Image (cartoon, rainbow, N blue to C red):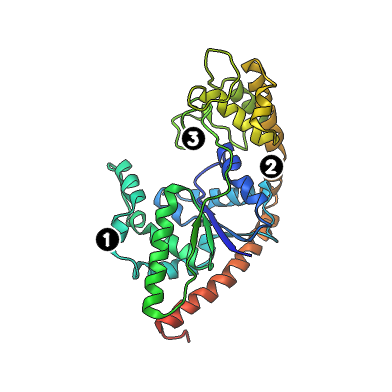
Amino acid sequence: MPRVLSCIQPTGPVHLGNYLGALSNWVSGQHDGDVFHGIVDLHALTAIDTPGLIGKQTIELAAMLFACGLDPEIATVFVQSHIHEHTELAWIMECTVSYGELSRMTQFKDKSARREAEFISAGLFTYPALQAADILLYDANEVPVGDDQRQHIEITRDIAVRFNHRFGDTFVLPKAVHPKAGARVMDLQDPTSKMSKSATSDSGLVYLLDDNASISKKFKRAVTDSDGEVKYDVAKKPGVSNLLDILSASTGKPVDELVGQYSQYGALKSDTGDAVIAVVEPIRARFQELMQDKGELARLLSIGNERARNVAAVTLQRAHSAIGLLPRI
């Protein structure tokens, strides 16, 4: 059974695109491998500097992952900053990767360009070293990533190969794999753009914690087109196609079957909103239940933290021994 690692940053509320595009697959796939899911709060420090915010968003994200259906007895859900081995191994990774390799990372170039007038931290530059530590600590065989993250897996492999060459076989070489295809969820007001927290307005975003009335309202106001034909065509009818994709993902019915059931946009919008409400209602209820019982939430998190810590400690010790660091006294 392969060990699979997926991580998520606690950068704000979870929206429908996050759930249908990724988290629902995490839940359905938790029995298919030895899965580790990290809430990488230290990475969020490159974008958040408000006191207390990262901790608040971390506990809320943990509650949401459990509410969505991750079982801590099966899937190892852990908080990155609770496992000190991440930062210790990150320094070793920084000493194994070159300045040139880090400077060629396209995500650093893109993010620093967008923040040209803002403070750009060294952490944004050395981010791939911490990410390499996140992956290598858990002897991950597979890391499901989109195309925008493949370069990070490649540099992780390069770091591991260089370390293994210098000090002997120590790290498992991870393989980037395409994640199981999730639903393609676009902004309801701009259906040519992915649903994203970076959107200029929340009117096209559906958050899992939105109340039912808000969800219905957002779907009723979803942008479509003027010809009135319910047809799946992403290029020519992105708004209608987006609604059909969401309805299909929420009900399990094929898009082709759904197309034949509608002749008007109003009914399609209404039914899609209702289907989404049926999906998120139990998630929202479980989230609220967990947030009101912090003791239970802490217990669930401690299960994954302990399991992750046990694996990470062995890997870090293996790296220390390979280097020849003085054993701790």
Q: Secondary structure at mark 2?
A: helix
In percent of width and height, residue 283 lies at 69, 42
Q: Earlier in the sequence, mark 3 or mark 1?
A: 1
Where does label 1 land, which residue?
Answer: 100
Mark 3 vs mark 2: give the one in front: 3
Q: Which amino acid, by three-letter code, is at mark 1? A: Gly
Q: Which amino acid, by three-letter code, is at mark 3? A: Lys
Q: Which amino acid, by three-letter code, is at mark 2? A: Ile
Look at the image and tell me whether residue 271 can be seen: yes
Q: Earlier in the sequence, mark 3 or mark 2?
A: 3
In percent of width and height, residue 134 lies at 48, 63
Q: What distance separates the C-alpha of mark 1 from that of mark 2?
A: 45 Å
Residue 296, image quadrant: bottom right
Where does label 2 land, which residue?
Answer: 283
Mark number displayed over residue 194:
3
Q: What distance separates the C-alpha of mark 3 from that of mark 2?
A: 22 Å
Residue 259, image quadrant: top right
Other residues around mark 1 within 10 Å, as few (<14) / some (14–19) / many (≥20): few
